[in-house]
Amino acid sequence: MILAYALILLIVLALLLGRDFNGLARISYRGGWKLAAIVAGLFVLQAGLILYVSGQTMLQMGVLILSQVALSWLLVLNRHVPGAKLFAVGIVLNVAVMVANGGWMPVTPETYRFVHPDRTVADYSRPPASKNIVLPRSETRLWLLSDIVRISLPWRQTAISVGDVFLVGGAAQFIFQSTSRKGQKTVKGSDAEEGVST
């Protein structure tokens, strides 16, 4: 969810700064629509399992791993695209901590109460319709990679991981390096080959 908020804010900021989004169409993407469709389908399935299947199952773990591997392969193929490398780092960090903790993103009881002060959830349980699992810090593997960064937004409170920070950074690099200021020409040569505009 935080990535969706960040994307909206980044796009609005880019528009306010007069960036030309036509540059996005000039990027050469690799992998084809079939791989992109597979990635999208796996993420839809993953979201469905999170929303409608309680507890933790091997199916959820398998879909999580497959979706992240497929997305990582898509990013490897498109590593020339601005932001792809940062995005890949974010995915690896998030997957590492989730796999280490049974397939879910761990959050401490204190942080969960910060995000949802009106809810009561027992330790070692997964909140409904959530990718999180509530674990005490002492029981969390790779705690530094879990949702530990607390953020107060004007409309809600949330918590993100270090991996999420890389994802937002990758999205920002993609938007601002792939677009040009209106009135400027796209740089040709080596930058154009890498899909980057000024």
Image (cartoon, rainbow, N blue to C red):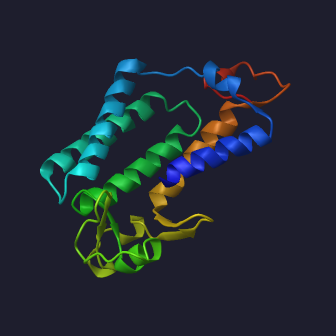
Q: 84 left or right of 95?
A: right
Residue closer to the observer: 177 or 156: 156
* Percent position of residue 89, x then y: 45, 49
Picture residue at 69% right of the left edge, 23% below the top: 22
Q: Is residue 129 visible?
A: yes
* Percent position of residue 10, x then y: 65, 46
Name the image quarter holding residue 46: top left
Q: In the picture shown, does residue 147 fall above or below 14? A: below
Picture residue at 48% right of the left edge, 29% below the top: 78
- Quarter that holds the C terminus: top right
Q: In the picture shown, does residue 113 fall above or below 158? A: below
Picture residue at 48% right of the left edge, 55% below the top: 164
Q: In the picture shown, does residue 13 fall above or below 30? A: below
Name the image quarter holding residue 194: top right
* Percent position of residue 95, x then y: 33, 52
Residue closer to the observer: 62 or 157: 157
Q: 94 left or right of 138?
A: right
Q: State the count of labels.
A: 0
Q: 174 left or right of 113?
A: right
Residue closer to the observer: 79 or 168: 168
